[in-house]
Amino acid sequence: MHAKSIDEVPRMSLPACLKCNSEFVYQDQQLLICPECAFEWDPEEHAAENAPLTEKDANGNTLHEGDKVTLAKDLKVKGSSQVLKVGTKALIRRIVEGKDHQLDCRIDGAGEMMVTAKFVKRA
Ligand SMILES: [Zn+2]
């Protein structure tokens, strides 16, 4: 008689519970459910909501909130004659959705401005 062999139960790698960090989360259709605190969530929905927005700079590098950048070209401040020179330093405070002016930046010497992502370079 052969000895029986025992294998690990295959387990999909599920994330820990978002509320109590339990590792015993299981999946029921599209929902993840925590047996310990009864919290249920949809991982896809959650990922979409929490994924921070990113944009691409002039060189195609990914920009994140908090990145330091420099202007990739001279930019005129809308409604004024002020021109911000290429190379001016800025800090991305926030990234918003949009076709242009996605970056809420604090720009050296100019203050807070909305800047189009492709007009900056990651520093
Ligand atoms: Zn839990």
Image (tube, rainbow, N blue to C red):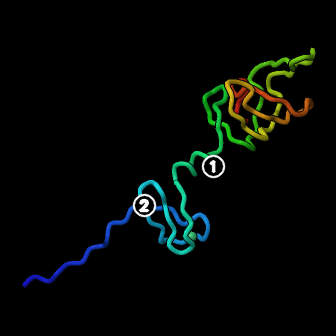
Q: Residue at x 81, y 19 (%)?
A: 75
Q: Residue at x 55, y 70 (%)?
A: 38
Residue 31, above or below 73: below
Mark 2 to mark 1 CA distance (whole Å): 22 Å
Which secondary structure, mark 1? helix
Residue 53 % position (x, y): 65, 40
Whether residue 46 sits left or right of residue 81 in the image: it is: left
- Image quarter for residue 114? top right
- Amino acid tagged 2: Asp
- Image quarter for residue 94? top right
Q: Residue at x 20, y 78 (%)?
A: 5
Residue labelled with disc 1: 50
All told, the count of numbered labels is 2
Residue 2 % position (x, y): 10, 82
Whether residue 119 sits left or right of residue 80 in the image: it is: left
- Amino acid tagged 1: Asn
Q: Residue at x 68, y 41 (%)?
A: 64
Which secondary structure, mark 2? strand
